[in-house]
């Protein structure tokens, strides 16, 4: 059975997906960010889209410069949705 879900990637979701890629040592490009979102939805459910805190405490505590995440997000945002 195949199920298709449609949702909009907002700023918070995009930033947490980028942070997840960086945390895992994966380059945060369009393909990898989409895969990170898909993987998290499979593991934690669709609520992970609306509640970025469900991605895990390890990401909340991960210290990576916010301005770098925002810079990557601004480059990817137009190509994700």
Image: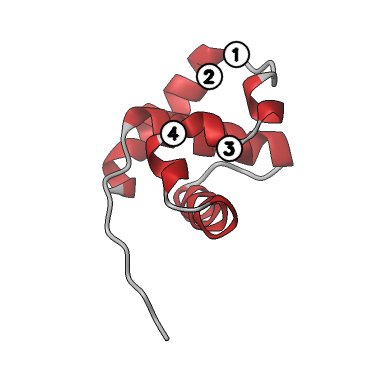
| Mark number, residue 65 | 1
| Mark number, residue 68 | 2
**Mark toward the viewer: 3 or 1:** 3
Which of these two is toward me, 72 or 7? 7
Residue at which label 4 appears: 51
Element type at mark 2: helix
Percent coordinates x, y for residue 26 in the rendering: 67, 45
Which residue is at a point 50% across and 47% down the rendered structure image?
33
Q: Earlier in the sequence, mark 4 or mark 2?
A: 4
The reply, left or right, for residue 70 in relation to residue 11 is: right
Disc 4/disc 2 C-alpha distance (Å): 22 Å
Element type at mark 3: helix
Which residue is at a point 49% across and 13% down the rendered structure image?
67
The reply, left or right, for residue 3 in relation to residue 67 is: left
**Marks 2 & 1, CB-CB < 8 Å contact:** yes
Residue at which label 3 appears: 55
Which of these two is toward me, 38 or 81? 38
**Marks 3 & 1, CB-CB < 8 Å contact:** no
Q: Earlier in the sequence, mark 3 or mark 2?
A: 3
In the picture, which quadrant includes the N terminus? bottom left
Q: Earlier in the sequence, mark 3 or mark 1?
A: 3
Percent coordinates x, y for residue 32 in the rendering: 54, 52
How many C-alpha atoms fall within 10 Å of the one at disc 1: few (<14), some, or many (≥20)?
Answer: few
Q: Earlier in the sequence, mark 1 or mark 4?
A: 4
Percent coordinates x, y for residue 9 in the rendering: 32, 42
How many C-alpha atoms fall within 10 Å of the one at disc 4: few (<14), some, or many (≥20)?
Answer: few
**Mark toward the viewer: 1 or 4:** 4
Disc 1/disc 4 C-alpha distance (Å): 21 Å
Total tally of numbered discs in the picture: 4
Element type at mark 4: loop
Disc 4/disc 3 C-alpha distance (Å): 8 Å
Disc 3/disc 1 C-alpha distance (Å): 18 Å
């Amino acid at each position: 059975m195949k199920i298709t879900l449609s949702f909009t990637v907002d700023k918070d979701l995009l930033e947490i997906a980028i942070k997840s890629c960086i945390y895992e040592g994966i380059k945060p490009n369009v393909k990898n960010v989409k895969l990170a979102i898909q993987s998290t939805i499979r593991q934690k459910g669709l609520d992970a889209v609306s509640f970025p805190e469900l991605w895990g405490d390890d990401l909340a505590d991960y210290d990576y410069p916010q301005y770098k995440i925002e810079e990557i997000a601004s480059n990817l945002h137009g190509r994700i949705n």
